[in-house]
Image (cartoon, rainbow, N blue to C red):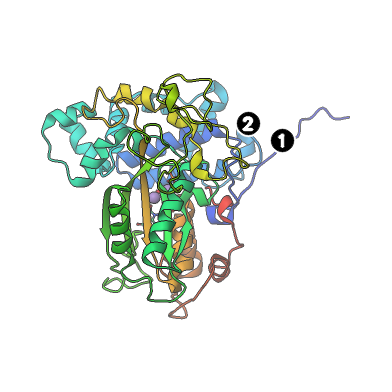
Amino acid sequence: QSNKVEVVVFSAPSYACKRRTTLKNHNTLLTEALSILAESAELNEDEGRGVAFRRAAAVLKCLPKAVSSMEQLRGLPCLGDHSMRVIKDILENGASSEAESTKQSERFKALKVLTGIFGVGAKTADRWFREGIHSLSQLQESGHTLNQAQQAGLQFYDDINLPVSKTEADAISEIVEKAVHAVLPGAEITLTGGFRRGKLTGHDVDFLITHPEEGKEEGLMPKVVSWLESQGFLLYQKTTRNSYLESKDGPGRPASNMDRFERCLSIFKLTKDRCVGQKQGTKQSATPIESHVKTVCSLGDPTQAKGEGNSESLTGSCQKTEPNPQSHPHPLSQIHPSNLTLNVLGQEKSLDVDQAQTSGHKPWRAVRVDLVVSPVSQFAFALLGWTGSKLFERELRRWAGHEKAMSLSSHALYDNKQSRYLRASSEEEIFAHLGLEYIPPTERNA
Ligand code: 8DG
Ligand code: MN
Ligand code: MN
């Protein structure tokens, strides 16, 4: 009998779009460190370095087991010298000294805080940092003129930096469906982004809207936005009209990975329940959409507690009610536990932001929502392009360009050899055109 220990040597295709990456990650210690370094590179506007670390993290995300030794990694693509040093450090010492010192650096911390403001990118944050602005309060004192997006970003800072739960995403879905159907019956709404990949939380909620009859979707966004505004659902919105046909660079060759659909970047006001709704005159018989969530919490006044909540434990903050499909069929009737930390966070952050919306209890939260409208002829491309992950998308385009001489965008797929567009009415067909095995959304978490 041999006492040799067999070493599992991992292998994986080098394109992330050829790998199946579920949300089960056996190497979080490694991938979190590499993601910090990627984030830091991105904040320093070093895209190449950012992508290199993202690719390295992604290849570790798809492994069936935790990495326990460096020799298991020979055979894996995308791991450069730098990533290998980071991995070695973690395997030997339990942590990456580089990732740790990056996380603790003043610059990284400040840039994270500043880019946490909706509407503030790496460039702006870097400029402010070099001017000595390292915190939200310093930004406010600086007298800088903020654009509309940034003003909203600052005003709803805490909420926007609080993860959105699937339950909240479902509540937003209902509102979006109601809005879209009110202005265009027959239109179809699809949840995209991370939630379509099966994530349980997200930084926003992404939707793709189309109509089975080509052309019917034209001009839809302003109508949807008006309806949402009239109902008080929008705290902020910026709509960009479709510029696909006007663009000079041609459908198959977008100028950047930004597409040209009619789109709306928004901040929704999501009412949690009727915590104080009674006082504000919300009728008990209100339809779910009107009283977004049935009463599941109390503001410390037992008389406000309705039967559905846990009226025995009134602590002055929202009580999570266990989801019970029998008696609470409506998704809006659930409150994510993350909301319970809102006030704690709010008090901390409201020192930075005077008029922080989270000071005290409020019966609603701000949620970032992205709406995109696509003609049905481009729907499959838009769906594939907006489902992510970002790295998966990047790798699909790289595969198309480098291996297939094709140009993939969220609008179309162009075959450079045949000099023609390849039609598709499903994601499966696009993968087939690209000569790739179909990867379902839940396995695109690269
Ligand atoms: P998260 O919100 O849960 O944190 O993650 P996510 O849903 O994966 O990220 P996201 O930032 O909401 O982006 C969702 C997808 O949408 C992602 O694949 C990238 C894609 N996307 C944008 N902007 C644009 C754009 O301008 N054009 C195209 N084609 N895709 C875009 O975010
Ligand atoms: Mn998203
Ligand atoms: Mn988004």
Name, please, the residue furthest toward the left.
143
* Image position, residue 322 (x, y; %): 57, 32
Q: Secondary structure at mark 2?
A: loop
* Image position, residue 225 (x, y; %): 30, 57
> Which residue occupies the foreground of this view, 193 or 388?
193
Residue 233 visible in the displayed image: yes
Mark 2: few/some/many CA within 10 Å (<14, 14-19, 20+): some
Q: Residue 204 vs residue 438: left or right?
A: left
Q: Secondary structure at mark 1?
A: loop
Q: Residue 307 vs residue 105: left or right?
A: right
Q: Amino acid at mark 1?
A: Val
The answer to whether mark 1 is within 8 Å of ligand 1 is: no
Residue depicted at 41% across the width and 55% down the height:
176
Residue 134, compared with residue 383, is above or below; it is above
Based on the displayed image, in which of its 4 quarters is residue 211 positioned? Answer: bottom left
Q: Which residue is mark 1?
A: 7
Name, please, the residue furthest toward the right.
1
Mark 1: few/some/many CA within 10 Å (<14, 14-19, 20+): few
Q: Amino acid at mark 2?
A: Ser
Rendered image: mark on residue 341: none
Q: Residue 432 vs residue 315: left or right?
A: right
